[in-house]
Amino acid sequence: MWFFLTAGGGGQMNLDLVKIVGVSAAGKSTLVAGLRELGYNARPVAQEHSQVPDMWQRIRPPNWLIFLDADLTAQGERRPDVSWDEPWRRTELERLAHARLHADLVIDTSFLSAENVLKQSVDFLRVSRVQAASGPLTELPRTGSVWHQD
C-alpha cells in the first residue's frame, strides 16, 4: 500500500508502511521512534491487547511486518510497574500468533539493547530495499513505557 507523507525536507515521498507488533515491553514504541527518526514509515500495533487475530493487517495493511518478542524476565525488568506471569504471556502469544506467522522479521529482544534491535531492523529494511525519507518523520505518541537498556 502506498500513501504520501511529508518528509523532513518538505518533499513528498511514497514510503512503504512498516508495522511493529509484539508482546508487551518488547520495545515496539522504542523501535518505532528509532525507525521514524531515520525516515522509515513505522507504526506500532498494540495487537497483544486485541482478540482480533489479524488486527495488524485490518487498517492500512503494512508492506512489512516486524515482530518483537521478549521473555517474561525482560518484560518484568522493562516494566516493573506491571505484574507479569506466564498465563498472561501465553495469552499475548496466542493473540499474536497470526502476526508472528506472517512477520517478515522476528527479533527476540530479551537480551538486546534498543540500539541493537534498531540496527537489526534497519539492516533488514535496507537489504529489503525499503526506502526511507531524507529526514525524520513526525514522532508518534508512545505507548507503554520507554525502554532504555545500557
Image (tube, rainbow, N blue to C red):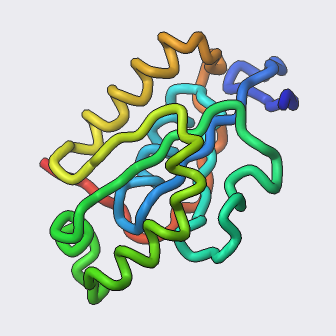
Instruction: Give the farthest residue toward the bottom.
Output: 83
Above or below — where is 129 with respect to 108? Answer: above
Please tell me which residue lies in front, 17 or 13.
17
x and y percentages locating residue 79 in the rendered image: 28, 74
Q: Which residue is drawn at 15% across and 48% down?
A: 111
Left or right: where 63 falls relative to 71? right
Above or below — where is 48 with respect to 67? Answer: below
x and y percentages locating residue 70 in the rendered image: 29, 58
Q: Which residue is drawn at 32% across and 37% down?
A: 117
Q: Residue at x 28, y 44 (%)?
A: 114
Which quadrant of the figure has residue 39? top right
Please tell me which residue lies in front, 1 or 9.
1
Which quadrant of the figure has residue 73? bottom left
Left or right: where 98 falls relative to 59? left
x and y percentages locating residue 122 in the rendered image: 43, 24
Viewport quadrant of the N terminus: top right
x and y percentages locating residue 35 in the rendered image: 50, 34
Above or below — where is 7 with respect to 43? Answer: above
Q: Residue at x 53, y 46 (%)?
A: 101
Please tell me which residue lies in front, 57 or 125.
57
Please tell me which residue lies in front, 110 or 102.
102
